[in-house]
Image (tube, helix red, strand yellow):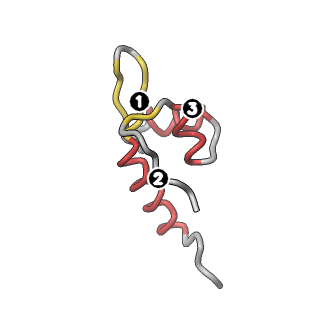
Amino acid sequence: MVQTPTRRWLRPREAAEFLAVDTQTVYRLARTGRLPCAKVAGSLRIDGLRLQAYMEAQSKSSGAGMMK
């Protein structure tokens, strides 16, 4: 089971680790508006609480974890 982020705002590298994807994927998802984020002092930060919700929504829509 993936652990919920413990901090509110994550760096792209931390979000990538949480999602088990490459850091560039996090940047792409943020750029296209699919991943909730903000610029803080010119640096991208990802909302950790909404990141968890994003991941859960993706799991449900893809049917991950369901036995067939």
Residue at image point 55% right, 72% down: 63
Amino acid type of the residue that numbered disc 3 sits on in the rendered structure = Arg
Q: Please, what is the three-letter code of the amino acid marked with disc 1?
A: Arg
Can you tell which of label 1 and label 2 is closer to the viewer?
2
Give coordinates of residue 27: x percent, y percent: 51, 32
Q: Circle 1 sits in a helix, a strand or a loop, which is it?
A: strand
Is residue 58 or residue 12 the one in the foreground? 12
Q: Which residue is mark 1?
A: 45
Q: Which residue is mark 3?
A: 13
Residue 55 in percent (x, y) is at 48, 55
- Residue drawn 36% across and 39% down? 8
* Marked residue nearer the N-terminal end (1 or 2): 2
In terms of image quadrants, where is residue 35?
top left
Snapshot quadrant of residue 41: top left
At 51% from the left and 64% from the top, the residue drawn is: 59
Q: Is residue 31 above or below residue 50?
A: above
As measured in the structure, the alpha-carbon distance from the residue carrying label 3 to the one carrying label 2 is 15 Å
Rendered image: mark on residue 4:
2
Of the numbered discs 1 and 3, the one sitting upstream in the chain is: 3
Q: Position of residue 58 (x, y in %)?
A: 48, 60
User: What's the distance in space between the residues labelled 1 and 3, CA to CA?
Assistant: 10 Å
Q: Amino acid at mark 2?
A: Thr
Which disc is residue 26 wearing? none
Give how far apart the Cα atoms at labels 1 and 2 are.
Answer: 16 Å
Query: Depth check: 18 or 36 in front?
Result: 18
Res 34 quadrant in image: top left
Q: How many marks?
A: 3
Tell me the SS state at disc 3: helix
Q: Is residue 65 left or right of residue 6?
A: right
